[in-house]
Image (cartoon, helix red, strand yellow):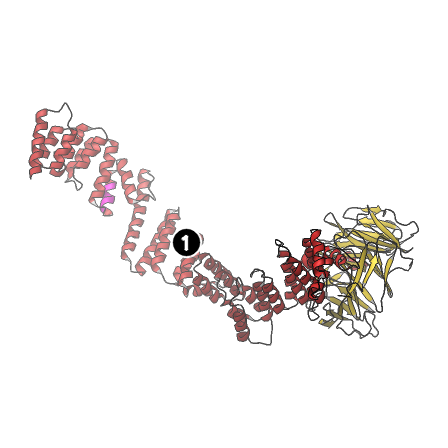
Amino acid sequence: MAFVTANWNPLGEAFYRKIELYEMGWNLKDGLRECLVAAAPYGGPIALLKGRIRRSPSARPQLEIYSSSGLPLASFPWKSGVVKQLGWTVTDDLLCVQEDGTVLVYDLFGGFKRHFSMGNEVSQSQVLDTKIFHSPYGTGVAILTGALRFTLAANIDDIKLRRLPEVPGLQGAPSCWAVLTQDRQCKVLVANESQLFILDNTACTPVTPPGLSPEASSIVQMCVSFSYKYLALITDSGHVWMGTSNLKEKLSEVDTKIKTPPKQMAWCRRPKSQQPSAVVMWDGLLLVVGESKETIKYHLDDESILVPELDGVRIISGTHHELLQEVPGACEEIFKIASMAPGALLLEAHKEYEKESQKADEYLREIKEQSLLSEAVRQCVEAAGHEHEPETQKTLLRAASFGKCFLSNFPPEQFVSMCRDLRVLNAVRDYTVGIPLTHTQFKQMTLQVLIDRLVYRKLYPLAIEVCRYLKTPEYQGVSRVLKHWACYKVQQKEESDEVIAKAVSVKLADAAGISYSEIATKAYESGRTELAIKLLEFEPRSGEQVPLLLKMKKSPLALSKAIESGDTDLVYTVVMYLKNELNRGDFFMMLRNQPVALSLYRQFCKHQEQDTLKDLFNQDDDHEELGNFYVKASYKEKRLEARIALLQSAVDEYYKAKNEFSAKATEDEMRLLRFQRKLEEEKGEPLVGFPLHETMTMLLSVGLHKHAEQLYKDFRVPDKRFWWLKLKALAEKEDWEELEKFAKSKKSPIGYLPFVEVCIKHHNKYEAKKYVSKVTPEQKVKAHLAVGDVEGAAEAAIERRSESEISTVLSRCSSTTDHLLVERLNRAKATAAKK
């Protein structure tokens, strides 16, 4: 604690500190000399391309990937073209931009993923310079070609190449250039000697930095801030200009007194800081410039590179990895010499308390008198987050905890959250993990991205511990990590399918929301089909199993799983897939072994593919269904000859099925069709296609009684049915004479009450009375009442001694009815009731 400010250096109103993150674990013989180096932001991995200058024709460059602590992650000889630039995507994939404009993409462990081209123009004129940048759209690549034209892709995952306008007066490579992101658009800022131009999609606009030193004849280096809001330029006169990236506002200008062009330059401003600052690097010298005329100088022993970060600059050399940043406000308030800030007083109070000194009470009283105890606790908690040394963090958090004891309503969330965050940060900063995140970066990155990075590095146990410690929802945390672990596990070649399947099932047994089908897909893509099938057995959702089984050509198993699921849509999906994949014979044979699938497919064919349905019945020798098929097909056929032919085929099939009833019925239908055609030709009446009874009705209605009777006899129409049809037809025509003859022809099988009713229906009471006498005794009352003969109905009802019939007649009596008849009816009713 006594040496917290030992590495602080004042600059203007702020202090800067350089913190050692790691002693690098790599063993680089020549350091970073002759290496192409790229380090990912947010404490990401480091890529080195060694041996770019070939000392012998057979020597190949070596591409090596390390963690931020210098631990090796991958190494392989470079066998492709000349590399102009290395860079990292937002998801920690390595981009290698070649001289011909081809960009190769590798994962963190050197596995090749894909490649893409930056266009024919770049390929033809070669790459002169390139920059890999991060934009709101993702990771972008900007290229300066040998033709001195710029080509830009804002997102390598959705490549849309843009050729930017030409820079006027540019005869050779520009002195420097950078990519800006403004108004959700990527632009290029180009310096041609002392002139500056902004290139966008449509125009090349000259710009002038306000207040730039007139001594400058050329801008030799530039850099933009991490957020693209600020810009720093250095001129050949040694002046560093800092301002907004839209070049509308100047923040400061400092004379470095060094006119040699620097090797690298990086912005070094903390979020919410009031002071602009930049870091400029020459051979052996690092300079921090800000608002004041003074600068901070650091001497460099080795070749180094600068890595801009959200809240500072990382400095990587062959032996060390350091972080240079402005001292955060809370840390400055607490640790600054002679500070009287509430946080500083609380820290001193806690120190004295541990010594059991009365001074602790004096410091506390001083803070309380100013009502700043809450602020003191907040400062200590915040400062703990910005410190890298665990001992310093603990000291500050103990002081904050001490101060909280004297507050009754201080919310604990900030303190608890900081303790958890620091435990996680200290774990990932560990030398073996090598992710030196600051608390500011961690909050900007979010927990989910940190877990993704741990998973990407295959640090599954640590990722799970982080998720459990921070109580991340399972589907976002532990389950997601275990799924990635399982996908990695199934790609391991050294273990058997049984061992891996068992390990995965045991590990994932209690995990919620994991799709085994995704893990099985990975196994299948790795060439382990049997392992994929074993893993699918653990997948409870058939809808997830079936697509992969089909992809693996395991059609019978896919069909069985679909049927087991009870999901008809899923079964249809598999059946349709098999129909397209298999030849007709194999397809039908597979369906025969699966009755459910066969039944569903038949249902489908009934509506969609009639011919296929016929083939199915043929293959199964199902003559009954074939007969039904031909009968249904005949109804759709308009040509009579074709219809009869189909019916004949149906008859043949019915006889093969030994279904004589259906065969006879179909033969009758064929005879009816022939009869209808013959009669249609003779009489001109359109009859073909009508059912038997409708045909008879039509014949009767047009007076063709003999033909109707012929149908009646030939087709064994029931007597009652025929009499009803003829009765209605004659009544409709009001052919009462023919109706009377019909009634006298022979005894009516339907009785004579229908004759009475049909006459009454057609308002012919006279004709109706002719048939009343022929009505059976049971129907006499109804018949008399139908023709309005109340007296006759009364006589019939009294004669039958039926109480219900007598009541019916009484209900039809009116005031004009003979009262003697009414009395007779009442007496008869009373007599019937006694019985």
The quarter holding residue 421 reads: bottom right
- Residue 18 percent location from the top left of the image: 79, 63
Tell me the residue that label 1 is attached to.
606
Residue visible at 28% across and 43% down in the picture: 693
- Residue 255 percent location from the top left of the image: 90, 55
Please tell me whether mark 1 sits on a helix, a strand or a loop. helix
Secondary structure mostly seen in magenta is helix
Q: Give the amino acid at mark 1.
A: Lys
> Quadrant location of the C terminus?
top left
The quarter holding residue 611 reads: bottom left
Q: Is residue 818 magenta?
A: no
Residue visible at 37% across and 54% down in the picture: 629
Q: Residue furthest front?
A: 358
The mark tally for this picture is: 1
Question: Could you tell whether 226 is left or right of 195 in the image?
Answer: left
- Residue 112 percent location from the top left of the image: 69, 67
The range drawn in magenta is: 708-713
Mark 1 Cα shell of 10 Å, populated few (<14), some (14-19), many (≥20): some
Q: Is residue 710 magenta?
A: yes
Q: Residue furthest top?
A: 816
Q: Can residue 585 be seen by looking at this rendering?
A: no
Question: Could you tell whether 629 is left or right of 561 in the image?
Answer: left
Choose between 449 and 9: the one closer to the eye. Answer: 9
Q: Can residue 647 be seen by looking at this rendering?
A: yes
Choose between 480 and 143: the one closer to the eye. Answer: 480
- Residue 303 percent location from the top left of the image: 83, 68
